[in-house]
Amino acid sequence: FPVTIWKTKDSSAPQRGGLIGPAIRRDYSPQVRALLSKVGDMRITSIIVQRVPIDNTLKTVINAISLGTYQKTASRMGYDKVFHLSLILTLDNKIRVVVEKNEVINISTSIPPMKKGGAQMAVPLTNSSTTTDNDAFTLNNFLDSTQSKLGSKYFLYGAFKSNCQMFVIALLKVNGLLTPDLETFILQDAGKLLEGMPWYMKDVTRGITNIG
């Protein structure tokens, strides 16, 4: 495929390597950076993991491009639904933010509504050295510790590996909050889905993720 490089004044803007290749961002979007400048130093008082079924439009598009192999593979693996994962954090002064990875990392005070078939699970904070009594347990520190651990993979998105669920797993694990029950609630083996589909689907799904 032809290569197109976008040059912008914003070094955090996505750099696209092909027509259906991933948009690679090396920093948060300007909107996310603006929000973190306001609420990033606030303490986290609660965390909820939310999973919602991916949009039917997205499933239809992926299934069509994969020549029907997406639905066949999902059914064979017993995945009646494929979920999008996010974290809903409550900060000081009852401010709530959603933290999720789509094609880019999104952090917003606009909390997505619960969809039919969705579910939530609370993250037990008292079972970790990271507790609500710790003044250092802020949104910025929660994110920064994970970015430090993941390095360049922190901002990289891939629908089957560096996806929303692996991002949530990393945030919880790095901060000492991941439990076996949470891991079971979060994880679906998206890599196995990819194995049953045509070779080009890895890049195609990156390019159409924002439909959902």
Image (cartoon, helix red, strand yellow):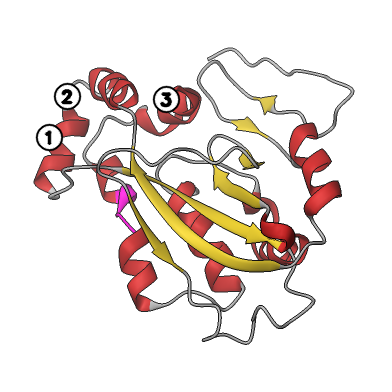
Element marked by disc 2? loop
Q: Is residue 188 magenta?
A: yes
The answer to whether 126 is drawn above or below residue 86 in the figure is below
Q: Amino acid at mark 3?
A: Val
**On residue 7, which mark appears?**
none
* Residue 133 as seen in the image, left or right of residue 172: right
User: Would you say residue 29 is visible in this rendering?
Assistant: no
Asked whether the beta carbons under mark 2 and mark 3 sit within 8 Å of each other, the answer is no
Q: Amino acid at mark 2?
A: Gly
How many angstroms separate mark 3 from mark 1 (CA)? 18 Å
Q: Nearer the viewer, residue 160 or 143?
A: 143
Q: Which residue is mark 3?
A: 204
Q: Amino acid at mark 1?
A: Lys
| Residue 79, image x, y percentages | 18, 47
Q: Residue furthest right?
A: 9
The answer to whether 135 is drawn above or below residue 160 in the figure is below
The answer to whether 133 is drawn above or below residue 154 in the figure is below
Asked whether the beta carbons under mark 2 and mark 1 sit within 8 Å of each other, the answer is yes
Q: Which residue is mark 2?
A: 68
